[in-house]
Image (spheres, rainbow, N blue to C red):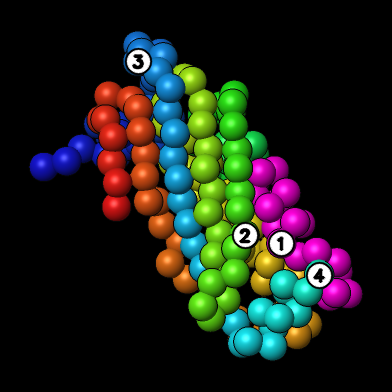
Amino acid sequence: MTRLTHIDEAGRARMVDVSDKAVTTRQAVAEGFLRMSPQTLDLALSGQGRKGDVRAVAEIAGVMAAKRTADLIPMCHPLALSKVEVRVEPAEGGLSVTARVKTTGQTGVEMEALTAASVALLTLYDMLKAAEKGMVIEQVRLVEKTGGTSGDWRA
């Protein structure tokens, strides 16, 4: 049976002690999708919305979110991130978001990548909701992680 590392022997939530873990290069990639009508997608891509270039703002919001993950997720360690890259790209039926986060440290950056992708998607929704309230955020997931004692993983 798998033991959850954020739960102690008494069943209480805890921050994992990573002080004995090796410092390694770690990277994670997360993605998500915002489904919308063709008209809203055209508006998003035109940069002519009332709130400006929604893709650029969402990418910046994702970077900022990755840097604040430990403030949002209670058991996450504050990390010195060496790279955060968020890309918003057009895709069939909406906008796709990919977040890539990297650090050299004692714990991984999966939560930072997932937070970056999620906040970028929420920012897109916020900036486009005047045009379409029925947009759907979907498929937010980790697609890759490298480094650390558990090794590499890909979806």
Q: Give yes or no for contact between labels 1 and 4 (Cβ–Cβ under 8 Å).
A: yes
| Quadrant assignment, res 70 | top right
| Quadrant assignment, res 123 | bottom right
Residue at the location (51% across, 78% down)? 92
Label 3, label 2: how far apart the Cα atoms are:
34 Å
User: Which residue is more in the foreground, 104 or 8?
Assistant: 104
| Quadrant assignment, res 18 | top left
Q: Which residue is mark 1?
A: 55
Q: What is the secondary structure assignment of the residue under circle 2?
A: strand
Q: Nearer the viewer, mark 3 or mark 1?
A: 1
Q: Earlier in the sequence, mark 3 or mark 1?
A: 3
Question: Which is the main secondary structure of the residues drawn in magenta?
Answer: helix
Q: Which residue is mark 4?
A: 47
The magenta span reads: 48-65
Q: Which residue is mark 3?
A: 21
Amino acid beneath label 2: Val
Q: Give yes or no for contact between labels 3 and 4 (Cβ–Cβ under 8 Å).
A: no
Label 4, label 2: how far apart the Cα atoms are:
13 Å
Q: Which mark is residue 88?
A: 2
Q: Nearer the viewer, mark 3 or mark 4?
A: 4
Residue 150, percent from left and from top: 25, 30
Q: What is the secondary structure assignment of the residue under circle 4?
A: loop
The quarter of the picture where the N terminus appears is: top left
Q: Is residue 93 visible?
A: yes
Q: Give yes or no for contact between labels 1 and 2 (Cβ–Cβ under 8 Å).
A: yes
Q: Is residue 53 magenta?
A: yes
